[in-house]
Image (tube, grey):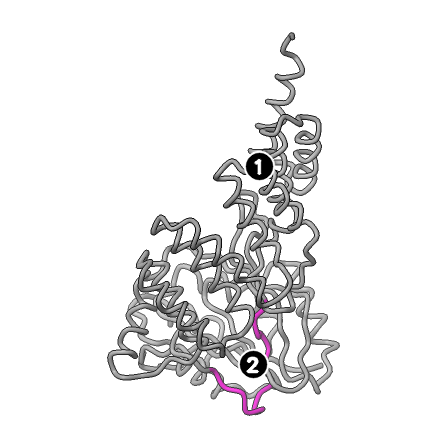
Amino acid sequence: MVSISLCMIVKDEEDVLARCLESVAGLVDEIIVVDTGSTDRTREIAARFTSQVFEFPWQDDFAAARNASFSHASMDYCMWLDADDVLLEADQAALLELKETLDPAVSVVMSPYHTGFDQSGRVTFSYYRERLIKNHAGMRWVGAVHEAITPVGQILYASFAVTHRKSRPSDPDRNLRIYQAQLAAGAELDPRQRFYYGRELYYHQRWDEALAVFEEFLEEGRGWVENCIDACCLCAYCHEQLDQPEAALAALLRTFAYDLPRAETCCEMGRWFLQRERLAQAAYWYTLALTCSRDDRRGCFVSPDCYGYLPYIQLCVCYSRLGDQKRAEAFNELAAACKPDSPAVLQNRAWFQSQRETPL
């Protein structure tokens, strides 16, 4: 059985840290908590789980802090979690099984990171992250913001997931401040960091600036294909906000130059046409979304609803407006198979029932 060092960086996490550590303490062989300047009870709570609590002055650099946490690890693999992460019961069992069977030749274990959920707790946004990294194998975190480790050697895709459960909003301006300070100091962002800088501008509704960064990122041609596809979609959203619908459509179409269609992009194409009451075209794109294969191991951001529920419920809308109520109702039931408690599904059912009961 391999051994695992849990390595965390924390600051003012008294509301969530115990929840996180309780979910994983029995699965790891040591816990390392690096505090970057807490003023609450974070260190006291960490000390209930481990004697290895260290201080690291915050430097506006997440990679530096994570590398500091890994430097204290003594086990075979380093595992990272944020304080507002948690392992659910099924994922705890899956991690334990992995730990008992993992081939020590594996350098990096990738696992799903669930970060978005609907009102019933179903996952609506997920992507793979490097979760277990072989210790002393020369891999280091890079990137002051949205830090990452580039996997080398043998990579394993595991089934256990980490669930991100925020209890409060984080500082919405922190990441943008870090990027802007880097640029002001003359730093040159690599393609991945430039992509995420564009995202931060987008989140701050600075549409023109975000567009300029994304266009530079795309034109340079050195970005990872999944980031390029996502950048095109974000360009489309920016164009929409700037009342440039044709440019938005062109940005979505640009995604198809990079790879086979993703269901997420097809749904966006469908939305573009549906908003303009071009129902047959909208139905075409939602139907195409249902033919797209989902492959989370590509590492892209995945919206599971786009591979079933969303196209079905939107096809219900399209065919209802086209006057084909029988076909619309059938698609509503397919959506119901994905989400039986969906308010949209239940509302549609009630409407279809009322139409059958209304005398001619």
For the point 71% across and 81% down, the residue is 1
- Residue holding disc 1: 279
Check disc 1 and give the amino acid type. Leu
- Residue holding disc 2: 78
Q: Secondary structure at mark 1?
A: helix
* Of 81 and 350, the residue lying toward us: 350
Magenta stretch holds residue 132:
yes
Magenta stretch holds residue 326:
no
Query: Picture coordinates of residue 94 (x, y %)?
Result: 69, 66
* Quadrant in which residue 220 is drawn: bottom left
Which segment is the magenta one?
A: 128-141
* Of 348 and 7, the residue lying toward us: 348
304 relative to 326 in the view: left or right? left
Crowdedness near tag 2: few (<14), some (14–19) or many (≥20) residues, C-alpha within 10 Å: many
Crowdedness near tag 1: few (<14), some (14–19) or many (≥20) residues, C-alpha within 10 Å: many
Q: Which mark is residue 190?
A: none
* Of 305 and 228, the residue lying toward us: 228
For the point 40% across and 59% down, the residue is 15
Quarter of the image that includes the C terminus: top right
Residue sitting at the far top: 359
* Of 107 and 192, the residue lying toward us: 192
Query: Picture coordinates of residue 64 (x, y %)?
Result: 40, 83
Q: Secondary structure at mark 2?
A: strand
User: Closer to the camera: disc 2 or disc 1?
Assistant: 1
Check disc 2 and give the amino acid type. Cys
Residue 7, placed above or below residue 310: below
* Quadrant in which residue 45 is drawn: bottom left
For the point 70% across and 38% down, the residue is 334
